[in-house]
Image (tube, coloured by chain):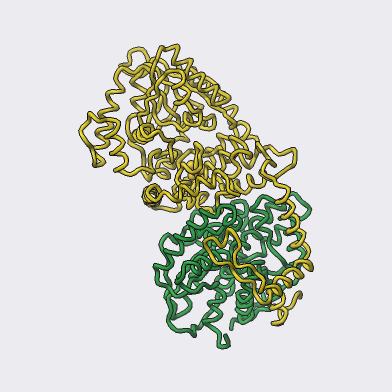
Amino acid sequence: MRPHVGSPPHFQPSGTIGAPGRRNERRLVRGRAAGDTVDRACTTEHQKMPNTVYFFGTCLIDLLFPRTGLAAMRLLERAGLRVLFPQGQTCCGQPAYNAGYRDEARRVARAQLDAFPESLPVVVPSASCAGMLKVHYPLLLAGTADAARADAFAGRVVELTDFLVRVLDLRLTDLGPPIRVAVHNSCSSRRELGVADATMDLLRRLERVELVEPERAHECCGFGGTFAIKQPEISAAMAADKTSAIAATGAAVLVSQDCGCLMNLGGTFARRGGGPAVKHVAEFIWERTSHDD
Amino acid sequence: MTTEFRLAIGAALGRERVRTNIRKAMDGLVSKRAAAFPDADERERLRDQGEAIRGESVARLPELLEELERSCTRNGIQVHWAETGEDANRLVLDILRHAEATALLKGKSMVSEEMGLNEYLKHAGIEAVETDLGELIIQLAGEAPSHIIAPAIHKDRAEIAALFREHYPDQPPAERIEELTALARRVMRKRFRGMTAGLSGVNFAVAETGTLCLVENEGNGRLCTTLPDLHIAVMGIEKVVARLDQIPPLLTLLTRSATGQPITTYVNFISGPRRPGEQDGPRAVHLILLDNGRSRIRLDPELSATLRCIRCAACMNHCPVYTRLGGHAYGTVYPGPIGSILEPQLHGLAERGEMAEASSLCGACAEVCPVRIPIPRLLNRLRFEAVNAQADSPALGHGSRRLAGQAGLWRLWAWTCAHPRIYRTLTRLMTALRPLQPTRIKPWTDTREAPRIAGQDLHRLARAAGFTDRL
Ligand code: SF4
């Protein structure tokens, strides 16, 4: 187990700038990007590990996939961190935000700011929700009384896999049998946060896991939140193509860092029959590396 | 809600052949673009430059347009201003009538599609002759363009061969691509002869020098702009750039993003009519500057980014929605991501607001846009404006898509999520009533199984597992 290095907790979430290999075409959040470059330049070298973190579970995991949330928190705890789960947290507000209801999203956003008051990292097991908290809260609350609070909060938010790899540099001992795993990186992980590599990186630390990427890996699975409801035909067509590509890899398990994608793809697989088991990366890793599950 | 757009989408998804053709073509364009930018750093630098140059164009639009007018006039190009498509059509017709032209040779121009020029001229008894191969094909088929740079991309070789057989029965049959293009060339060359008027679009217009820049691969654009005595150029006002030295970076961004070419076969710089002593070139050149809502779009500091667009089509080539639908399903002049931000602004959210919803916000478009238009962010903004009932919004048709029932539901949802106690009571209730969860939740379960509500929510599981609430 890694020792903790002192307090005060001092860490730098990756934000939107990548290390050279991740430079990519990722410039959706340019304003923040510029700021982050400066910060990172002075902190990447001697990044200190925090000893306490907040966990933001997301509403989807809360109600539909709580085992995923629990697995993620246990991974953090096993790495020696104290994990706080504020009972005041609800939803990041993204559904309303993407449906155009900004006042409503703002109301929900403020409630989350209230729920995470201390200056601690906020670890989020979803790139999509992390993107909302990190990239869109500052935009949504700009010019309001909560602008500064939103900026500070955004600076503390870090996507789970990114945190596990970059901040914790988590070591894993694979206890499972050899297995072929397909990875689906969510669009938010790729293009909004630029943390898609972290999931692959983590899975590579499992010795007996063979990783495969389906064809057209970069393409959206068709979930898109309210998109799946408002444009169900296109969404279904995208999910059908994506599931076919995944099935063609012959993987036994499909892993992603976002439960939204997994709900879409898992639901589609369940309907068409066959296909791999579907798991959030945190749950998959927890199961492969713990004796008690 | 099953709207006309949704019906068109359903129909498009059912047309297997078109879907296959488009997907294949888009895959090709995507890999060509990727190969054209082997160096990511150079690509990103160029995109920075593209954004800055086009950003300057939009920011300084009024003064640049006036400078363009002065420079063009100095060069002997007659400049006309059109506020609407209708105005632009009338200008074209007046110019043609004055020159006693009965037909018009046309190079490819999306602005002329926006104007509905061909239809307009037809009513006035003037034949518009499309000379771009793709435009010719869809004109023969009686269709609209399905893509902004490759208008007939939805058709495969066999369909084109059949069209040519039908329309040019006296020509030797053609099947292979070379035969088809040769046939088109033979037919078109004949049409060029004796034509007195040509029309083209404009890729960029340089304010400082009064130069009109036009890229193309077939040479038909050059013929349209040099062979007839009269050349009319139509452009959206946003296509102006300040200086000539800004053209090279824009050109390379445009051609590499569009087709993966380092440069197109033809790059035309038009700087005025034939001068005394010159052997060829038109005797009169007119430039029509079309506004059609662009000045209004420019007023909003965020949405004005739309006007940076150089119409390279990379956003649609990479769009998972466009690649499955093709352009026709949108029913608009501009399809795909650029269409989804431009059309609702040109025509108002009441009429076209639904386009902004036809996106999963995956961000593939913004990732490739050579001038870094933040398309997903603008889509989000347009969704907001569509339901924004406040009076001071600059967006055309703002608030028009607000439904009282829907707004009420979102208010209720926000109230729940902003009150953790109520939220927790509700999730607890839902987990308790889990056995009653319906298995059919439309439209989700039309093609998928619905996820099952958990026996216990994470709030309770976390607490039970000893994860504390606060420090
Ligand atoms: S929005 Fe960007 S990618 Fe799309 S056509 Fe315009 S310039 Fe090209």
Q: Which shade is chain B?
A: yellow
Question: Could you tell me residue A185's position as x and y percent?
Answer: 51, 64
- Please state which of residues B455 and B22 is positioned toward the viewer in this rendering: B455
Quadrant in which residue A67 is drawn? bottom right
Quadrant in which residue B278 is drawn? top left
Q: Which shade is chain A?
A: green
Return the residue found at the far bottom.
A291
- Please state which of residues B292 and A250 is positioned toward the viewer in this rendering: A250
Q: Which residue is located at x 34 percent, y 34 percent? A: B133
Q: Which residue is located at x 65 percent, y 58 percent? A: A94
Residue A110 to residue B455: above or below: above
| Quadrant (top left, top right, bottom left, bottom right) of the N terminus of chain A | bottom right
Question: Could you tell me residue B196's position as x and y percent?
Answer: 36, 16
Instruction: Determine whether, in the image, residue A144 is placed left or right of residue B254.
Output: right
Using the rendered image of the protein, determine whether residue B369 is visible from the camera's viewpoint.
Answer: yes
Instruction: Determine whether, in the image, residue B314 is placed left or right of residue A225.
Output: left
Q: Which residue is located at x 49 percent, y 36 percent? A: B333
| Quadrant (top left, top right, bottom left, bottom right) of the C terminus of chain A | bottom right
Return the residue found at the far left.
B172
Quadrant in which residue A208 is drawn? bottom left
Count of labels in the image: 0
- Please state which of residues B254 and B6 is positioned toward the viewer in this rendering: B6
Question: Could you tell me residue B85's position as x and y percent?
Answer: 54, 26
Using the rendered image of the protein, determine whether residue B50 is visible from the camera's viewpoint.
Answer: no
Question: Could you tell me residue A146's position as x and y percent?
Answer: 76, 55
Residue B14 to residue A84: above or below: above
Instruction: Determine whether, in the image, residue A71 is placed left or right of residue B369.
Output: right
Q: Which residue is located at x 70 percent, y 47 percent? A: B403
